Amino acid sequence: MVSIRESINPHLPALRKRVGKVPQNPGIYRWLNEQGEVLYVGKAKNLRSRLRSYLQVQDTSVGPWKLSMRRQLSDFDITVTNTELEALVLETNLIKEKKPKYNVLMKDDKNYLYVQISLQDPYPAIGLVRRGIAPGTKGFGPYTGAMDIAQTLDMLHGIFPYRACRKSVEALNRACAKGKNPETVFNRESTPCLEYQIGQCCGLCVGALTQQEYRTAIEQVMKFLRGERAAAIEKLQQRMQKAAQNHQFELAAQLRDTLEAIERLEERQLVSDTSGEDIDIIGMAVMKGHAQALVLRQRDGRIIDEIALPLAGTCDSEEEALAQFLPQFYGTTPDIPPLIVIGRSLEEQEVLDAWLTEKRSSTVKLKRPERGRKAELLALAQKNAQEKLKQLETAWEAAAKKTEGALSELKDILTLEETPKRIEGYDISHLSGTETVGSMVVAKNGKAMSDQYRSFTIRTLKEGEVDDYKALREVLKRRLLHLVHDLKQEEKRWKEKGITFGRARKNEMQTIETTIQEQKLAPDDLQAKDFLVARRGKTIVGFARLYRYKDATKMLKSLWIEEKFRGAKLGQFLCRKLLKREKKGKIYLLTSKDLEEYYGEIGFRYIHEGPPLMEKMFRNLPTKTPCIRMMYDVKEHRNDTSLSTKPDLLVIDGGKGQLSTALAVLKELDLKFPVIGLAKREEEVFVPGNAHPLVFPKDSQAKFLLMRLRNEAHRFANAHREKRLSSSAFRSQLDSVPGIGATLRTKLLTRFGSVTAIKAASDEEIKEILTPKQLKTLREHL
């Protein structure tokens, strides 16, 4: 008898059999769904035992989120490691890279700021950075409020002038590196920088302070960030008294305000004692699958900071959330104390202790206190984490209701059969006909899904050609073909028509050779193993081949379809079936210019230059035949979960013309999806079969949702175009020089820096990179 859970996921019995053969070593495991997406990454001391625990038939201890995951399990992958510590490091890296749905993970660390101090330099610099601290530098953080930490650093410069202009710091460090006396680099007669003139530079550039004085200021800033604020308070008090004595009352008032701000920081310290201990106290709250971490940082016996970190992903317990949060948090923060207080005992606590000790280069312990001051601090951290999570839950519920209302309104106004859960927005962007690009953005349940966004570089427009309709047609067709191209279903439909497919047989090669000669196709080195053949009964009605040359160049060649089957896209199916066999690399093609769109629909794209062997073939082609080079990159055509997911609504940036283009593409591909156009000028919404725009209620949340999606598509398209411009602006002239490939272009630009510099360079200099023949070609084209 099959259990209810087994019927929900038919893959479980097969998975249980496979798990029985998994080694009992430490390592990491990845659970996958049917689309190959990573659902969860975990580590284990015993891989077989851990994987088996997910698949037990009568396991009632599984929480709702893990049960939800188990319904989707289709496959797994493992990586065996030598030790549990190796598994911990690998697990943390994979979670950051894959961002699995059922793992708890810190949100993108671009949101967090660190103070970075280059103590390895004779003249250290202080700056704010994202994504962690550079090796060799001293760091503080993370800080979640950019404005707060920036204001703190501004305030510290007013107390301990530490900021120096970049020019002076770099010059002084260079002098030290060369063994020169740094105090001879600048003096009182040096020209001061602009920052110095407005009070934002300490005066290194005019020799206003010595190296020791400068480093002393840096050290005072570091002490303050560690929580040692007595020196700052004392200095402010002295300056305030002096300003009052000199009747500088405005300055005294400013100093008083700064002093009060620091004293408020002191007052915010929750508790303190005389132990002088450095401790982090981790509070963790879990509610409805969401998790919130809160870190209290105690330094020298005083609580100096609170870091609230809402976590992405889902989980069922505080233990699970803690086990995944700790390696991620301490993998980025530069400040690891010797003691970390946590609220739950963890199964792999010894491994975490060892990893933290290795990171800190001295002993670190995780501890769960039962009583005393540390237990009180932990209770405080837990309470605050729970409160913050409640506040977030309230905000999420309000936002969800608002979005739910907008989607419901959209369903009613557009008379859709179902509420549109997945909405895709499209836009075209160009710069006077150059660098034309398209964008696809996705909203799922009203929420932007940036990992599902896709951009398209337009291939069918010539340089300078402006045709938004043609560009939109290309974007939509390239996107929607992913829903049409299902090799298994297509092959099934061809079989229903009596067409079967397979490798060429030896007894068929004479027929293939004769056809190739008659059709004047490439006749070189014909081998049965290279051909894929379409047959009707025993009669060959089509073939194509993928040929591998000795230099590893792979080319699609010899495509032929019997006359009566042309126009039914049998040739495209043969090509895609051949290409699907390739796991990696690039496949090249030489074809006539008028077949560019035909092969473009398969996935080939135009290129300026191919590998040397292909270039030799290209030069030997008859000049009367306008031919082009094309290339298919296997990695660009791996299974894309975003493009293979069906949309519930298409939103096109534009009016009636753009809407008509979208409808024509849907008709051509025999697809039926709701589609609307959103014109910019009056924010008008056009729908098929209606000459006039729809009328939305004033302050319509549905219309605001559409506008946000359209604006996001516009932003994403512009960002992609700007990225292409920045990478190609100074290379475009070199790209057009025949015989100068990507490697030589890189060497030239690395050596000379720009096209202008290449033009100005002497022949002797350029000959160090190019042959005389290449040099001549370069001079002719630049």
Image: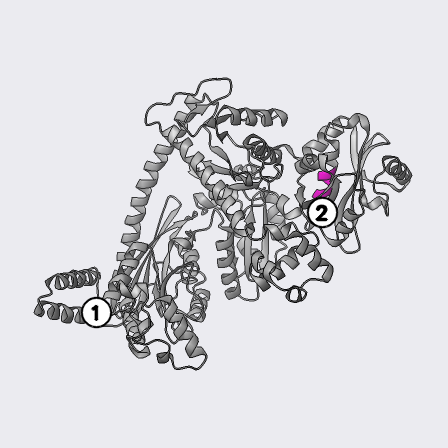
Asked whether, in this view, residue 267 is left or right of residue 775, the answer is left
Secondary structure of the residue carrying numbered label 1: helix
Residue 356 covered by magenta stretch:
no
Task: Say if residue 362 shows up in the picture.
Answer: no
Q: Compare residues 675 and 398 and report the one nearer the observer.
A: 675
Badge 2: residue crowd in 10 Å (few <14, some 14–19, many ≥20): many
Residues shaded magenta: 575-581
Query: Is residue 444 positioned above or below 269 on the image?
Result: above
Query: What residue did someone put label 2 on?
Result: 587
Secondary structure of the residue carrying numbered label 2: strand
Q: Position of residue 270 (x, y in %)?
A: 22, 60
Task: Say if residue 82 shows up in the picture.
Answer: yes
The secondary structure that dominates the magenta segment is helix
Instruction: Please give the label number shown on residue 232.
Output: 1
Q: Position of residue 287 (x, y in %)?
A: 35, 46
Q: Earlier in the sequence, mark 1 or mark 2?
A: 1
Asked whether, in this view, residue 418 is left or right of residue 76, the answer is left
